[in-house]
Image: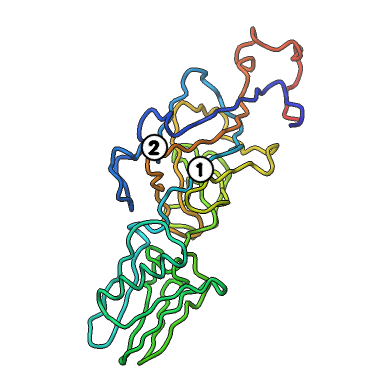
Amino acid sequence: MAALDPVFEYVELCLDSWDSSASAGTNWDGSTSPTDQIEYSWPQYYFNSKKLVVAGMKVLSAEIPYVYDTVTLKNNTFTFFHSGTTTVTITIPVGSYTGTTLAAALQTAIAVHSAGFLVVWNAATLRFQFTYAGAGVWSISFPNSRANAYSLMGFLPGNLSAGSGPGTIISPTVASPTGPYYLYLNSRTVGSLVNFNLPDGAAQGSGPEICRIPVTTNFGGVIQYQDPDPEKYFDFFIGNQITNFDLYLTLGSDQYQKPLDMKGVAWSLKLGLLCYREATQNLGKRPASMMKGETMRIK
């Protein structure tokens, strides 16, 4: 790190979800876990002892177990039609999947309403193949909304694919059965104080994001994150103190932006903070390097 102006002091804050003092939320949205586990997925922290006045912040590192569901109660449906039946909503069981296991779940879910369908995952093309051996018109469609299974299955919002008689429908886009390739770290109390931004019209409920974390492992592993440019810090609004704040994770891309259920498993991260020295407010504690009359600036 470059030389630090004597106006500032550098502070690291190490956080573990199990060090939470309280839950930042009271109800799950899209999770099947007990509500008393929400504290470990959406922790609230208190840091009153040092009375830090923060000028800049950066997420330096994180360790996040990949235990969360990529199929939740908010992205697990699509619409299916087969002549001779009414249009029905197919529901995929909540969980985390590979292409092969999601294909099996899709086939089982469709079979409840109409027999004769085969769903296969093509690992070479990263697409699903839906095959029907019988007669009649049939279709797979997705409402024009982001709260359904379109990206998991390789479709677009509002997409409708139809077949007639024996035939096959192939996902028109590459599917993401294992979920998005990155996560967002969010804070409702801190997110609005840093210039980490998404474009207008991005993910539903966006705004509190403070860091983008690539998913570097498969389900059951640990996502390891190191900031690629640790010398750059986000400015805080002048005078902001970190006395209490919340943190939670969401799926990346344009998925439903609600706190991920971390299943009660601990996850951790390290924050770097640039704080105003107490000497800037209490002249009796001014460092010797700060001479009388000296102009203080960020180098």
Provide residue 278's location: percent of width, then percent of height.
60, 16
Secondary structure at badge 2 equals helix
Question: Observer-nearest residue: 48 or 33?
Answer: 33
The residue that mark 2 highlights is: 40
Provide residue 54's location: percent of width, then percent of height.
57, 28
The residue that mark 1 highlights is: 64
Provide residue 273's location: percent of width, then percent of height.
60, 30
Question: Observer-nearest residue: 269 or 291?
Answer: 269
Name which of mark 2 and mark 1 comes first in the sequence. 2
Q: Is residue 15 left or right of residue 8?
A: left
**Distance from Cα at disc 2 to Cα at disc 1:** 12 Å
Label 2 crowding class (10 Å Cα cut-off): few <14, some 14-19, many 20+? many
Q: In this view, does 229 lie above or below 153?
A: above
Tell me the number on the disc at residue 218.
none
Question: Observer-nearest residue: 101 or 193?
Answer: 101
- Residue 14: which quarter of the image? top right
Q: Which residue is drawn at 34% across and 40% down?
A: 38
| Type of the residue with mark 2 | Tyr
Q: Quadrant of the C terminus?
A: top right
| Type of the residue with mark 1 | Ile
Residue projecting furthest to the top: 284
Q: In this view, does 177 lie above or below 137?
A: above
- Residue 133: which quarter of the image? bottom left
Q: In this view, does 175 lie to the left or right of 102?
A: right
Q: Residue at x 50, y 44 (%)?
A: 185
Q: Which residue is drawn at 56% across and 39% down?
A: 62
Count of marks placed on residues: 2
Provide residue 145's location: percent of width, then percent of height.
39, 67
Q: Is residue 60 above or below residue 244?
A: below
